[in-house]
Amino acid sequence: MLHFSRWKTLAILSSVVLALIFALPSMVPAGPRAILESYGLRAITLGLDLQGGSNVLLEVDRNDLRDKLAIQVTGDIRSALREAKIGYSGINRTPSGVSVRINKIEDMDRAETELKKLLQPVDTGIFSAGATTNLLELSRQEQQFTLGFSETGIDAKVTGAIAQTLKIIESRVNALGTAEPVIQQQGKDRIVVQLPGVQDPERVKNVIGRT
């Protein structure tokens, strides 16, 4: 039979009592909990594995991003060539970007100068602030120019979109009053949102996605 000295028994009982005291705020209703918290005791925040909650994964749709950027680039090409009074035809979406045919070969050099203004430097966020890359790359073949999306440029756009979205989501999730939410980037183009205690994922999506 195990035998503990009196001081060891008292030490064990004291540890158990203290553990119960500090765990008590997590087990009582809001009213009594407020009284306990006034003495410096705080409820333990339970994770998704203990109290359940919502886990929402958001992802940047790169194809949709390219489509929207292509519409923008098409408009930019039209405006630039019209302002420079350069005749063109056949602005078309290509797998890599947007192409345009210049009507007169003698206008090709002027058109190239104007189209180079549309390459759109974007911040890469690599190494230090101010590092940039071009969203578009200009190529020339006979009387046709193609403004194609660069992969580094698309990556930079996605990075910027993720950073901006994280701030927006954080402010909207804070409005839910959730204790210790997890909002963080996952990989290059995903955001994971974990809200302990919030059992309605659709409500979370509505709050995050509202305009």
Image (spheres, rainbow, N blue to C red):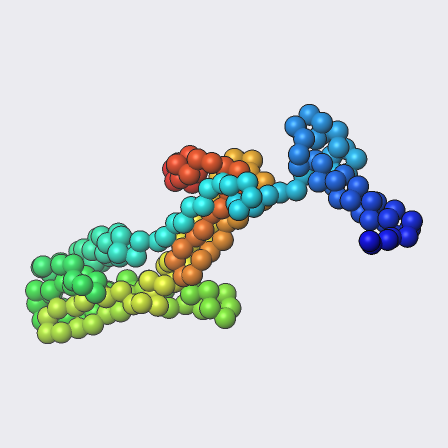
In the image, residue 39 above or below residue 118: above
Residue 29 in the image: x percent, y percent? 65, 28
Report whether residue 35 is seen: yes
The percent coordinates of residue 87 (x first, y second) are 11, 60
Q: Residue at x 90, y 52 (%)?
A: 5
**Number of numbered tags placed on the structure image:** 0
**53 to the left or right of 133:** right
Extreme residue toward the top, this view: 31
Q: Is residue 111 visible?
A: no
Residue at point 55%, 40% (across, down): 51
Q: Nearer the viewer, residue 125 or 42?
A: 42
Q: Is residue 63 above or below residue 40?
A: below
Above/below status of 77 relative to 17: below
x and y, in percent, of residue 40 in the image:
77, 38
**Residue at 27% in and 52% down:** 64
User: Measuring 71% from the left and 30% from the top, which residue is drawn there?
Assistant: 34
Quadrant of residue 43 in the image? top right
